[in-house]
Image: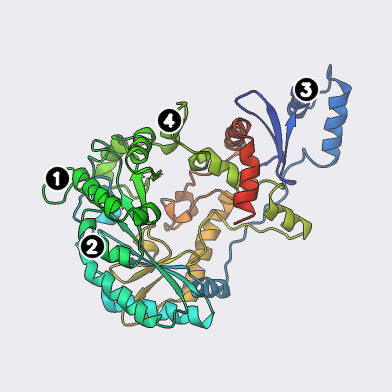
């Protein structure tokens, strides 16, 4: 099937202002309704001659032709994978599958396919030490001096012995202080009072999972008796805040999961009111739902954009622009879809031919390497274990050639979607979150992030409506986010 994609798209903001976006030049401009009429109908009758001349000028400079062939890169190289591995900034250990809570919506629980085979297994310490030695050797040979070591679960504090062994091992390994090592952990905070002295002494960065006030948190229940864990968690947090106020201020952050028993409003108001912090808010994972649990999932699931939109209508809300989804949409638009960004300007000036990889999946190991309790090596903890890239047993086994082959096959599968998608420059989608990525036959795979012209018009309208309300964010994003990053 031939899909015709237009170079220029006309769209209207909430304030009824008309804009034109041109893909080839990555150029946006406001347009008069008369020019909009000509662009959409190609009829110049009864239109001011000024706008007719303007239209003809734009047409002469190729604003209204069809898009050129979009070059999608479907191949990564072994050299690039090896380079990413040698400079990976983070090692993440799945310390244990065990947890003292039984959160109803947990991505590793009964609602999801991933939770079916979890039986409380602990990560073998020798496997973890093997991976550490391996990555450490790569760091030293490449003179890379930064490394974050993180602990994940289950509840990692249920296996504190493992954590202490790793920290002691790294201290001995790094006796010369060549590598700048830091530690982080995701925890439900039930055992925080018991181990906080150790965590403070080793300057851990802690991400606490908590969904807001007591009612908001009612899906986060104890494994043994099914009671709400809220009171114990806030008791521990209040204790840490009082005993180690500076540590609490700089090293403790929060993550809340959005569902039908809370909202962006209730979450933000709780955390700001009690701890003067703004948490991350994340949706429930949409993929891998057990079929018989789908009704429960649909009951619990809430769309973060809808909840945020409701809260943002209130004049006294606590949301900063930087916390809004439209702010992130605007940031990505300016970085990837606008010639006004430093990155785009440099590439254009140097006449660099852009080739785009399918979706926006992280390059393997470019952000972290994750070791599961079963010894699997993953590029991330947020994807299904079936996408394992290697394993650790008595040694580290990574077949780079096979990894390249695996990624290239996925990219080839996605190519036909991305080539006809208006978000081909950057969509924010991790391909591993697509339902049928690993099934044979691309006809089984559907990309729900796909943007045709109508979808893209709506997205542009949303972005520019936000920009009209917050024009100063344009300069803030260019100066503080795009250029700095």
Q: Which residue is drawn at 53% across and 65% down?
A: 408
**In the drawing, what numbered circle is on residue 311?**
4
Q: Distance between the residues labelled 2 and 4?
A: 37 Å
**In the drawing, what numbered circle is on residue 34?**
3
**Image position of 46 with respect to 258: above or below:** above
How would you rate the neighbour count of disc 1 (Cα within 10 Å): few for under 14, some for 14-19, many for 20 or more?
some
Expressed as whole percent of the image width and height from the top left, the position of residue 11 reads 66, 30
Residue at the extreme top of the image, as rendered: 46
**Image position of 428 with respect to 53: above or below:** below
**Image position of 355 with respect to 284: above or below:** below
Q: Residue at x 60, y 38 (%)?
A: 456
Q: Which of 335 and 11 is in front in this view?
A: 335
Q: Which residue is drawn at 64% across and 54% down?
A: 483
Residue mark closest to the camera, 3 vs 4: 4
**Image quadrant containing the N terminus:** top right
Q: Nearer the viewer, residue 48 or 282?
A: 282
Q: Which of marks 3 and 4 is nearer the N terminus?
A: 3
Element type at marker 1?
loop
Q: Which of marks 1 and 4 is nearer the N terminus?
A: 1
Residue mark closest to the camera, 1 vs 2: 2
Expressed as whole percent of the image width and height from the top left, the position of residue 395 reads 35, 82
Q: Which of marks 1 and 2 is nearer the N terminus?
A: 2
Q: Residue at x 36, y 78 (%)?
A: 171
**Residue named by callout 2:** 195
Q: Which of marks 3 and 2 is nearer the N terminus?
A: 3
């Amino acid at each position: 099937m031939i899909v015709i994609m237009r170079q220029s798209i006309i769209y209207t903001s909430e304030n009824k202002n008309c804009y034109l976006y041109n893909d080839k030049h990555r150029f946006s401009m406001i347009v008069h309704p008369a020019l909009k009429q000509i662009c959409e109908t190609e009829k110049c009758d009864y239109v001011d001659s000024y706008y007719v001349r303007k239209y003809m000028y734009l047409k002469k400079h190729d604003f209204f032709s069809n898009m050129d062939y979009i070059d999608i890169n479907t191949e990564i190289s072994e050299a690039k994978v090896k380079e990413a591995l040698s400079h990976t900034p983070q090692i993440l250990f799945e310390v244990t599958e065990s947890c003292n809570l039984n959160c109803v919506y947990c991505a590793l629980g009964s609602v999801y396919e991933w939770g079916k085979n979890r039986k409380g297994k602990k990560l073998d310490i020798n496997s973890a030490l093997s991976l550490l030695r391996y990555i450490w050797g790569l760091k030293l040979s490449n003179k890379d001096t930064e490394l974050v070591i993180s602990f994940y679960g289950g509840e990692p504090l249920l296996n504190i012995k493992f954590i202490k062994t790793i920290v002691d091992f790294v201290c001995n390994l790094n006796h010369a202080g060549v590598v700048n090592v830091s530690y982080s952990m995701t925890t439900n905070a039930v055992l925080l009072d018991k181990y906080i002295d150790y965590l403070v002494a080793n300057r851990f960065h802690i991400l606490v999972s908590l969904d807001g006030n007591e009612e908001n948190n009612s899906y986060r229940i104890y494994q043994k008796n099914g009671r709400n864990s809220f009171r114990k968690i806030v008791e521990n947090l209040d204790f840490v805040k009082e005993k180690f106020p500076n540590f609490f201020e700089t090293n403790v952050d929060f993550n809340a999961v959005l569902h039908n028993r809370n909202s962006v409003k209730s979450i933000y108001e709780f955390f700001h009111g009690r701890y003067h912090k703004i948490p991350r808010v994340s949706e429930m994972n949409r993929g891998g739902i057990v079929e018989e649990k789908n009704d429960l999932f649909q009951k619990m699931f809430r769309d973060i954009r809808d909840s945020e939109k409701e809260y943002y209508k209130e004049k006294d809300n606590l949301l900063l622009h930087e916390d809004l989804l439209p702010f992130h949409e605007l940031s990505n638009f300016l970085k990837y879809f606008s010639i006004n960004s430093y990155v785009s300007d440099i590439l254009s000036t140097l006449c660099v031919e852009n080739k785009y990889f399918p979706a926006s999946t992280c390059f393997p190991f470019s952000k972290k390497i994750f070791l599961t309790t079963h010894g699997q090596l993953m590029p991330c903890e947020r994807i299904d274990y079936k996408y394992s890239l290697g394993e650790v047993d008595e040694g580290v086994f990574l077949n780079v050639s096979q990894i390249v082959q695996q990624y290239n096959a996925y990219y080839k599968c996605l190519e036909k979607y991305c080539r006809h998608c208006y978000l081909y420059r950057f969509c924010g989608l991790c391909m591993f979150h697509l339902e049928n990525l690993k099934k044979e036959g691309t006809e089984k795979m559907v990309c729900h992030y796909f943007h045709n012209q109508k979808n893209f018009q709506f997205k542009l309208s949303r972005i520019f409506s936000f920009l009209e309300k917050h024009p100063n964010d344009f300069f803030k994003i260019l100066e503080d986010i795009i250029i700095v990053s």
